[in-house]
Image (cartoon, rainbow, N blue to C red):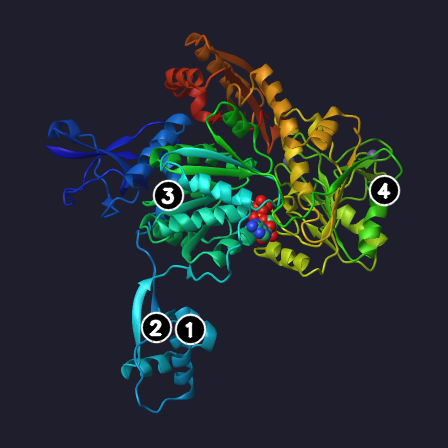
Amino acid sequence: MITLLEIAVPCPLRQTFDYIADPVIKIWQKGMRVEVPFGSRQLIGIVVNIKTAEDSDTQKLKQITRCIDVTVIIPSDLFQLTVWISDYYHHPIGDCFQTVLPKRLRLGDPADIQQESFWVFKQEQQLKLGKKQQQIIDLLKKYCHGLSQTELYNHLGPCRTSLLGLQQKSIIEQEVRFKKPYQIARSEPFQLNFEQQRVVETVSNGDKTFSPYLLDGITGSGKTEVYIELARKCIENNQQVLVLIPEIGLTSQFVQRFKQRLAATIVVLNSSVSDGERKQAWLLAQQGLADIVIGTRSAVFTPLPRLGLIIIDEEHDSSYKQQDGLRYHARNVALIRAQRASVPIIMGSATPSLESLYNVQQQRYQLLTLSQRATGAKLPKITLVDSGGPKADKALSSILYHAIDKEIKAGNQVLLFINRRGFAPVLMCHDCGWQAKCTYCDAKMIVHQRRNLLCCHHCGAMQRLIDQCPDCANTELNTYGAGTEQIEQNLQTFFPNTPVLRIDRDSTQRINAFSDLIEDINKGEARILVGTQMLAKGHDFHDVTLVGVLDADQGLFSADFRATESLAQLIVQVTGRAGRGEKAGEVIIQTSQPQHPFWKDLLKHGYRYTAKKLLQERQDLMMPPAGSLCIIRAEDKQQEIAMTLLNAMLALFNQNKHAQVMVFGPVPAIMEKRAGRYRAQLLLSSQHRKPIHQLLDRTIEQISALKLARKVRWSIDIDPIDLM
Ligand code: ADP
Ligand code: ZN
Ligand code: ZN
């Protein structure tokens, strides 16, 4: 008999492959990494099954090249979760394992945790010492558990010779330990207020089973403090905590608060972490050596043998959904994880998603509320301004202008939102009507004056800014509309002595640029801040007394079914940025539709009322969360090809028909051409989740067998967050 290994290989095929095991290694386990020959390449795959076969049956099979792991790298709970993800999202298993592993491990790095040198004070000796040596001893005496060599060098500069001298005299000792960021708590916890305490007690005294909670707490109500207290209790019980945060430029404020308050090993997994650090953090968590993992979307896959609690901050945030490859939703995956690990999960937001509110309604989640700002600060006054009224310039109403002027004179900070980067969204010829359009997309080129460029925000295409019409050679080209860059420039002209700071994806490209900018803001150096949505989330700027929203309309006319929900969330989040400190705040919203019922609902009755109404609309239309959707997208360089493939899929769906699933389309995407490809989509809709999955299960093999399906790019999006 021969041992066969079934391997999930990173490739787009929806199957696993059998290989003959290496005869030397005896103990095979699911979840190990192996290198295998695949076509002309060597790939790293995951063992998903171990089988035996007769010699004669294995003639055509290849042998694995090598086994990378001595023990299992993907623990069984994570292994099972990955299998579930592959089933639920109908995504190739090999590719799912790729998403689960950090890059370095995916590429075959050994699974060893980095270690580092520590120095510990041992005993006093009556010996004459050099100045540096005395400094070392004085420092180490302060750290009774020792200090890493790196930190020691940070304090005293490189001093290897002195260290070795002291070691020889047995005054200090060197130890090798796992490299991990342990810190001691530096600040005292707050006395939680009554509401916060009730939340902490409910969650920590609940059954130690799967229990999902929605924490609905207004901005500034102290949700983060609640998370910290809950985490503290877990650590005291020797449990690990997984904290998910949205993908926003700045997470350091949030992480710093955890670090300041908890004596624990906290590892961070977000986009600013290097591949090496990511691997180290992942392995520390996997070995149970990290107490808290704080990370964005993909951190939901971190192995945690002692998991005790999952926290999802800003649970409504759309960055939890991956929009390419494996299109998972981290909140959804986290819920499954919590359920399988039988632990509580707390999802917090000032503007809960309709999904979560629906689950509360269906009594699947327990609702917890924080209704007061923790510092006692008042919520700001909100004014709606007709953007068709008197203006200070193209984009700024005079009411907003005067309000800014007043706050600046009073020495306060002002925050302005406009949801568009660049200078202007349209460049047009005054004579012939020519407009700058992207060659590769059905989209206009955005004027970026500072960089002297025209850029496409969809595909990234760029060209030099032109000053002559390419069609009629006229030199009178006009821009229409405004973006952050233009607003920044105009404000600088209006208020020449006031520092204006722009915060958008262009001004924060450099690593740390965002945290540097935030520091400037907190130091009070910038008085007027102009930014995109990036600025709306979670930041705690104490001196901001006025928030202006310049273009609140877009969401009211979008073709996307979630646009109104997102707009309501954005407005409430933005509003939460004003008046967080001692001083009261004010919000001014410019809109061309001041009469739209949306505004009355939101401003008069609040987010919960608006959300309830929107949820009712969705229920009437059988749209998510009341119904279930799946989109199949296809794209190709040639027009019509995507449609042809989707039509072939439609024929298969019709053939395998499911009474409870409706299939719509195919139709070209709203922006049909993007990045040089023509896109189309097919929509599956049902009142429940199951039927869609059943129909897909029945059909997917036939789809994969279609000739075009092997040539054309296509993808399945389960529970899509937009229909674009
Ligand atoms: P959220 O996460 O809900 O926006 P935070 O946790 O950031 O709220 O708290 C808002 C502000 O209130 C912070 O400055 C925080 O330090 C403060 N705060 C939170 N809880 C308390 C408390 N119990 N007593 C005093 N201040 C608090
Ligand atoms: Zn022209
Ligand atoms: Zn483009």
Q: Are the two marked residues, 3 and 2, in contact with CB atoms closer than 8 angstroms?
A: no
Could one spot residue 16 in this view of the protein? yes
Q: Are marks 4 and 3 in contact (CB under 8 Å)?
A: no
The quarter of the image holding the C terminus is top right
Residue, disc 2: 119
Q: Amino acid at mark 3?
A: Gly
Circle nearer the viewer, 3 or 1 = 3
The three-letter amino acid code for the residue at tag 1 is: Leu
Q: Secondary structure at mark 2?
A: strand
User: What's the CA distance linking mark 3 and mark 2?
Assistant: 33 Å
Label 1 sits on residue:
152
Q: What amino acid type is highlighted by mark number 4?
A: Ile
Badges 1 and 2: C-beta atoms under 8 Å apart? yes
Q: Between label 4 and label 3, give the one nearer the viewer.
A: 3
Residue 191: numbered disc: none
- State the residue lying farthest toward the left: 1
Q: Are marks 4 and 2 in contact (CB under 8 Å)?
A: no
In the rendered image, which quarter is residue 552 located in? Answer: top right
Q: Residue 308 has which mark? A: 3
Label 4, on which residue? Answer: 399
Q: Is residue 228 left or right of residue 401?
A: left
Vertical arrangement, residue 457 with respect to residue 502, above or below: above
- Sooner in the amino-acid sequence: mark 1 or mark 2: 2
